[in-house]
Each structure stands twice: as structure tokens, then as C-alpha cells.
Image (tube, helix red, strand yellow):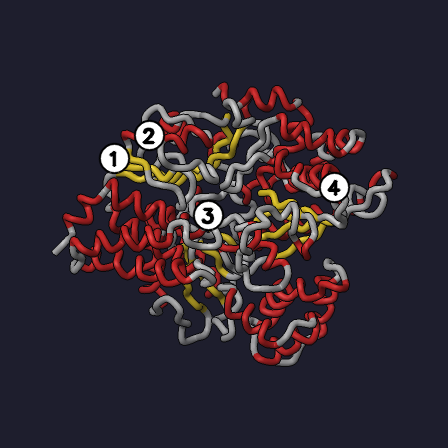
Amino acid sequence: MSTKQALLLSRNFAKTKQAKIDVAMKHGAYSMLKKAMSMKPDEVTAIVKESGLRGHGGAGFSAGTKWGFIPKDKFPRYVCVNADESEPGTCKDRLILERDPHLLLEGALICAWAVRAERIYIYIRGEYFYPAKVMQQAVDDAMKAGFIGENIKNSGWSCSVHLHTGAGAYICGEETGLIESMEGKKGFPRLKPPFFPAAVGLWGQPTIVNNVETLAFVPRILEIGPDKFAALGTPRNGGTALYSLSGHVKKPGVYELPMGTKMKELIYEYGGGIRNGNKLKAVIPGGSSSHILTAEECEDLPLDFESVAARGSMLGSAAVIVIDDTVSIPQLMIWLTRFYAHESCGQCTPCREGTDWLVRLAHRFADGWGTRKDIDDMFELADSIDGKTICALGQAVAWPTKSYLQKYRHEFEALVK
Amino acid sequence: MQIPDSLKTKAEEIIFRYPEEHRVSALVPVLFEAQRQLGWIDNDVEKWAAEFTGASSTKVREVTTFYSMLRRQPVGKYLIQFCQNISCSLTGGLELQQHVQQKLGIGPGETTEDGLFTLKYVECLGGCSWAPMMLVNENQYFQLTIEKLDRILDGFKSGNPVPPDEPTPLLGNIAGES
């Protein structure tokens, strides 16, 4: 397939022993760090901004802009790599951590150079035992090779890199929850303002929190140049993305494709279409927190942040979950709400109590004693969480819940006793 | 429980990652490591972690009860963490849950009488494209079928574990190159 040429970030994933530093260096690892270190930090930030690189963790915020928020005279500064991949449907950072850890390290180091940080922490979810093992080895090797530590390559700049393991909490993927967790506390997201950890982050200091994939793109941007990177995608959505394709497709997998690739192309041309000759019913386009899209709404839909938002959902972490016509949406509602009820950190009452009630109501339909009023109550309950919580987990459960009820109300009604 | 020297050594390694004035940042990783070595976290471990990191005992309890992977009771020799989230449930996870319950004769949260297996249903483990997936202790297993599940469980039972899927297999448009 000609699309293989589009492989940018993942081009070394299939190479044997790419996780080893000598092999990675044969394939160019750390050459872009050297290039970055020959430039002024602000120049590097400007290039990343120009490239149109957006955050691949879910929010899609411009990476270069985020780096630019670091206040001028406040030191020390930190970089936190968000490797807490746990948005249901999302499984692409796992591949970067396991298959090309030096690419991630190089990207994180370039970021640290650009913002003048002296420490990098890689916050990796506790369940990622093997990815953490590979990553720790990569850090040790890069330190021996002199890319991490004191006076890196005689530049006068010192930067250390450390792993920090989580222990099972979706909420720690929220950047201020991550920072709280790193400070030895429960992962309660912080009140905003201050809006960005770039101003007040880890231990009160300026901190950049970026997703694994976002940082792994940085060396590639320096390699091919910001213009070429930007041109790969659509306007305001630079480069490619790792799309996590799962659910009822014949060929699930992680596909690196240009930003703006059509949804139907991903599902039918790459994913091989729907399993068992079934029909496409719906798609969750950006992780479980996104509004569900009906099959019709997926027509002619480019997978970039603006296009999916214009269709009333979000690209999020580009985790595309495909659902065929054998699935009942009330059943899907149980799986969805159960997740958020389990992962609500408990800090805000609407979310803590509301998610639990949503699960109970969702179960009523499957158990055969749901009523028409329960449908309305669920909607109202979701609405009473939406926008009324400290962090975005509130929306993350409210939006999909409301969309299931709105678009598939008839399926709930059919189960009413 | 006694705190073994191997844990003390590892804890020193972990705490070295943080500035001296922020020792408490090591709390979660230190408790996680303690659990890896000792199987679970009891009051003695909590007390030691508090002294070691400088956290108050209330704070330590907050942490051990907040994070779902930290446990305050022992589990079987092999902890099965089976994903029950959307992608795994869409692709046969529910049948596999029934199968594993029948095979082991236990429900979620329970341990087999011989103390070998504990079964736990968990939320997304980040293996959605390779669903259904599970962890057995630190081993990741993907693309589960009844046959593969049987092989894995029998392997642990007979002391001949099936090698985990490490690294995660390549699927998608990345596969097939080298």
C-alpha cells in the first residue's frame, strides 16, 4: 500500500531490537536532539508551534503554544511525559513505549531543552509493566551514552530523566491530577485557574505535561521541517496520528495515517470493514469520552480535531471504536457508565454521586424494569454533571451518555416495561 | 510484615529520583514496589512507607485506598486482571469471563481454594486493538480466545507459564515491515 510512505513516527516500530540504543542510533536516534541543542530554545518552540502539532492525549491543544506559556524567569522547570494511557479505546502510546522508547526520550529531551527544564518525569500507568521495563532500560542506556545527566554533550545544560509509576487511576491522566499524584497524593485534579501547569505545575514550578505520542513527533518535526510536517495533515492539524482502531472491524490495530484521513477509509480500507458480514451501526470516534456517531454521521468525515468537533463529537485521543448492528446501545451504556463511576476520583459531588446513579439507571433497562422516566432522569442526571465539575471527567461521562440517549432513545424505549 | 532489605534497597533507588525536599513524591512508587515484593500492603508497610517518605499516616491511607492497584489484603499467587471495558466486551470478553469463572470455580474478587488464582475484572488496560486482553501478575496477554485462555491458566497451574505477549504484536499498517 502506498500509504506506507506516510509512516513517520512509527517507521522503526517493526525493526528488530529498535528499543536498544545502538540500534536506535543507527536509525538516527538523538541526531535531532543534537540539532535542537545547536539552536536557541525559543527557536525550537517556534518550530514546534509552526508545525501545527496538536496534543495527542485527548485535548488537542497546540504543543508549541503550551511550551510558550512557561513564565520567563521562574526556575526550576520540569517536563512530565504523560504515559498514563487509559482512555478506553486508546492503545497507541503502548507501542511507542515498547517499540521505540528512544524516540520518546529524544522528544522529551528536546522539549526540556526548549523550555530549559532540568528534570523529566515519565508518568507511566501501573498496569504497563512491560512498557515500563523497556522504558527504564532505555533511560539507563541513554544516560550511559551521555544524552541524559550532567552537562549533556558539553552544552552546560543538565537534565535528568526518571520513571514514576502510577497505581491504577484514570484520573491521573488529567494533567493536574497527574501532578498531584506525582506529589504523593490522591490524583485529585486542581482547581483552575491557574489554567496551565506551565505556570504552576509540579511542586509549584513551571511544568510541561505532554502525551507520549505528542513528544515522540518532535524529533520527526525537526527532521523533515515544520512546513512539510504541517502539510501532511489538514490546516491546523499538523502531521500524522496514530489511530487506535478497535471493536468490530476485521483488522483492528494501530494505524499511522495523516491527520484528516476519512473515517470510512480507516474502517473499510485499512480496517477491512465490519466483521462477520454485519452492518456498521455506530462509531465512538475519540475514546469513550466522545459523543457516539451514527453510521450516517461517519460519512465523509475527516478525522481531524475541527472536522469531528463540527460533527458534534471530538477526535480526542483518536481511538476509534467500531460498533456493529449486533450491539444494543443500552448495553453499551452500562459499560460506559460503569467505567466513569469506577474512575470518578470523588472530589466533586455531581460526578461522584451522578456516575454511580447513571450505572444503576443503565442497569434498569437491561434488567427489564426501566421506565420512560428513567430515560429522562438519566439525561437530566448527565446534564447535572456536565460542566459542573473541577475537571473534564464530568463532560467525559455526560457527553457520551447524552448522545446515546439522544441518538438511540428508541432502543431504551423498546426496553421499557 | 517485616520490611525486607531488598525492599529497602529498592526504595532508596526510587527516592533518589526526587529532590530531597520532595521525598513524599516517592510514596506511590514505593508502595507499589512494596506490593510487588510482599504481595500486599498491611499496616506495617504503611507505617514504614510513612516514615520513609515523611508522609503522615493519614495521607498514606488516603493513597492506599485511592489507587485501585494498591491492595490492603492478600491475593492468590496469580492475580488475573481481566479487562471488562468496551473494546474487550465487544470482542468476546463476556464469554471469556464466563469461561474463566467456570474453569476456576470463582467469581470476580475471589480466590481459588488452593490459593493459586485471584480473579479481578478491571477497566481499560490499553490493549483495545488486541482485545480481549488480561494481565496475569505482570504478564500481558492479548487476543484471547477460550483456547488461549485455557493454555495460559493451565500453564501457570503446571508451573510452565505461557510466555507473555512481549512486545505487543504489531497490527495495523505498521505490521509486516522489518
Label 1 to label 3, Cα distance in Å? 26 Å
**Where, by quadrant of the figure, is residue A36 drawn?**
top right
| Label 1 vs 2, first from the N-terminus | 1
Marks 1 and 3 on same chain:
yes
**Residue at the image position 32 percent from the left and 26 percent from the top:** A299
Residue A4 in the image, given as x and y percentages of width and height: 52, 23
Whether residues under marks 1 and 2 lie with C-beta atoms below 8 angstroms apart, the answer is: no
Foreground: disc 4 or disc 3: 4
| Label 1 vs 3, first from the N-terminus | 3
Side (left or right) of A48 relative to A350: right
Q: Which amino acid type corresponds to the residue marked 4 in the rendered image?
A: Lys
Whether residues under marks 4 and 1 lie with C-beta atoms below 8 angstroms apart, the answer is: no
Foreground: disc 2 or disc 4: 4
The crowd level at tag 3 (other Cα within 10 Å; few <14, some 14-19, many 20+) is many
Determine the secondary structure under disc 1: loop
Label of residue A298 in the image: 2
**Where, by quadrant of the figure, is residue A66 drawn?**
top right
On what subunit does the disc labeled 4 rest? A
| Label 4 vs 3, first from the N-terminus | 4
Foreground pick, A258 / B58: B58
Determine which residue is flagged by label 1.
A278
Determine which residue is flagged by label 4.
A72
**Residue at the image position 18 percent from the left and 55 percent from the top:** A373
